[in-house]
Image (cartoon, helix red, strand yellow):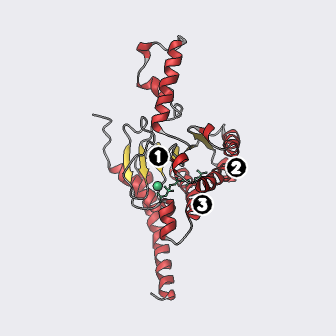
Amino acid sequence: MSAEEAESVRWFEGGFGLLYDRILSRKTRRGLLPTHVAIVMDGNRRFALSSGLRNEQGHRMGKEKVREVMRWCRDIGVKYLTVYALSIENLTSRSPDELATLFDLYESGFLELCDDREIHRDRVRCKAVGQLHLLPARVITAIDAAEKATKDYDDLVFTVCLAYGGRQELVNAIKDIISDHRDGKVDLDSICEELVSQYLYTHDMPDPDLVMRTSGEERVSNFLLWQMAYAELFFIDVHWPAFRKRDFLRVLRAYQGRQRRYGR
Ligand code: FPP
Ligand code: MG
């Protein structure tokens, strides 16, 4: 294809693509939206490899994608967005160089959120959950700053899972419940699903209605294990940096077409 032809295709797709997104967006707004969307952002390095980029650039583009998805959630009216940005396992399985790159991105990402005009205009509360003490001090400082700057907002609650593991979260919850039981604060008979939920990082938000993973992998990888019990799951064959608004809207439309059963 000549450069001129490629340009025409881009223009054609751009124009019709935008119209298509707008129609899809309008249809989606008319249906029932998930209150809480949780995402396993996967495929940064494969995207980089297939585009002739360095891994670092894939992660950088992945970070930019998060900002876009936050915007889409605000536009469409999703109230909670939770993203999986680093598993507890990643802390030992990724090279020190790659981890340093990721830590730089988390640090700069949270610092940018602190004084981002859109974040304040749209009243987005930003926070991080996980075994945060395992992260470098500079990342923890940036998280604290973003949490403090946005603590009074609740139009969209944006949560980043870092050094996170669903099993570890449950182990910690069990320890805390036993400790409170020993201190006489929790009666054995009062231990129920709702009480366990109160001991999780996500105690102040509803369980995710929709959990999606990009990159074609069909695993949950220790993400929100307790919380996703009744979530609708979607696996999308697109790497995270290449995830488009229309992919997101299509997932929401597919969610609207599903009949949720909650174990019935
Ligand atoms: C998964 O792709 C991606 C990660 C483990 C890191 C995700 C981090 C970001 C997108 C930055 C987020 C920043 C903020 C502030 C929220 P992968 O490395 O597993 O790629 P692969 O599956 O192709 O190997
Ligand atoms: Mg991966």
State the residue at coordinates (52%, 41%). Answer: 164
Which residue position holds label 2? Answer: 111
Q: Nearer the viewer, residue 127 or 171?
A: 171
Residue farthest to the top, as pictured: 184
Q: Position of residue 153 (x, y in %)?
A: 63, 40
Drawn side of residue 173 relative to residue 117, left or right:
left
- Choose between 72 and 215: the one closer to the eye: 215
Image x and y of residue 146, in percent: 68, 44
Front residue of this view, candidates 157 and 172: 172
Of discs 1 and 2, which sits in the foreground? 2
Q: Is residue 12 above or below residue 83?
A: below
Q: Which residue is mark 3?
A: 60
Residue 46 lies, with reference to residue 36, above or below; the image says: below
Q: Residue at x 63, y 44 (%)?
A: 123
Is residue 132 in view?
A: yes
Pair 3/2: label in front: 3
Alpha carbon distance from label 1 to label 2: 23 Å
In-image side of 151 versus 254 (left or right): right
Q: Does residue 139 sit above or below 13 in this rendering?
A: above
* Gap between marks 3 and 1 measured at Cα: 22 Å
Residue in the image at 46% along x and 70% along y: 17
Three-letter amino acid code of the residue under disc 2: Leu
Respond yes or no on whether mark 1 lies under 8 Å from ligand 1. Answer: no
* Sequence order check, earlier mark of 3 and 1: 1
Residue identified by numbered label 1: 37
Give neighbour class at mark 2: few <14, some 14-19, many 20+ (Cα, 10 Å): some
